[in-house]
Image (cartoon, rainbow, N blue to C red):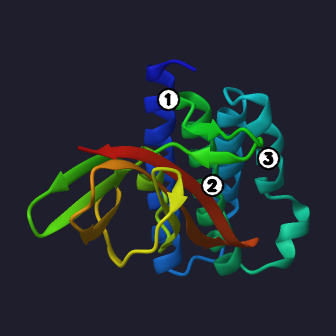
Amino acid sequence: MNTKKHAAITTSYEQLIAKVDRAMISKESNIKSLVQEYDEFLIDIKSVLATYYKEKLDQYFLTTDHLNFNAEYRLKMMKNNLTTAIIYTYESFTGNMIYSDTGSRYLRVRTTVKQNEHQTKIILFSNVFLLIKQENLIIVDKIIFNGFEKKMDFNITKNHGFTDIILDSLTSGTYKIEGTVQYFNRNGKTAIPFREEFKVQ
């Protein structure tokens, strides 16, 4: 998938999400054309996904079985599914997943460290998390210092790209942060693990 195609898919996603939001606000009951547009969007992005993501995307198409649900429920389902689908697209396009020695998958994030004499701010950034429109919960499971887990107090504040983790000033060395971002969709809670390593001079 080239950059132009990826940009076109992102635009289509944003336009479709806006239509779903308007339908939810106006409590529309006849959403047949919107469901058709939704399925066509999934077909379009499925054609450019890596095989791993194509198989995962199949569960998000709306079928005749979903007609048993009311329009409001189907709209919420569509919005959640669109968010997941566009994340698959971004991951497939940019290779944002990394793999550990055990085969576990983690989301790749970028780190900027800012320090002063009073505190250290670790700025984590991920384009993928920019696409998650639902309210999410960021959990830091562990902080590892020079290969050993280190207990320390910290505060988490969300930024436009992912999150800031604020700690007391850190000792020089190599740190690794492991955690998850959790959000809710039609299948319940979804947790995306992340892991990032950085150095403090």
Of the residues shown, which amino acid type is indicated by label 3? Lys
- Which mark is first along the chain, 2 or 3? 3
- Name which quarter of the figure residue 83 lies in: bottom right
Residue closer to the observer: 91 or 166: 166
C-alpha gap between disc 1 and disc 3: 19 Å
On screen, residue 80 versus residue 133, left or right, reads right
- Asked if residue 70 is positioned above or below residue 164 in the image, the reply reads below
Position of the N terminus by quadrant = top right
Q: For mark 1, give the secondary structure.
A: helix
Q: Position of residue 109 (x, y in %)?
A: 44, 45
Residue reaching furthest to the left:
117
Residue 167 is labelled as none
- Name which quarter of the figure residue 66 lies in: bottom right
Residue reaching furthest to the right:
65
Q: Residue at x 62, y 54 (%)?
A: 84
- Asked if residue 79 is positioned above or below residue 26 in the image, the reply reads above
Q: Residue at x 39, y 75 (%)?
A: 152
Q: Position of residue 125 (x, y in %)?
A: 36, 50
- Which mark is first along the chain, 2 or 1? 1
- Asked if residue 92 is positioned above or below residue 30 in the image, the reply reads above
- Asked if residue 146 is positioned above or below residue 165 in the image, the reply reads above
Residue closer to the observer: 66 or 149: 149
Badge 2 density bin: few <14, some 14–19, many ≥20, Cα 10 Å: some
Residue 6 is labelled as 1
The residue tagged 2 is 84
Of the residues shown, which amino acid type is indicated by label 1? His
The residue tagged 3 is 56
Q: Residue at x 41, y 48 (%)?
A: 126
Position of the C terminus by quadrant = top left
Q: Position of residue 100 (x, y in %)?
A: 68, 41
C-alpha gap between disc 3 and disc 2: 10 Å
Q: For mark 3, give the secondary structure.
A: helix
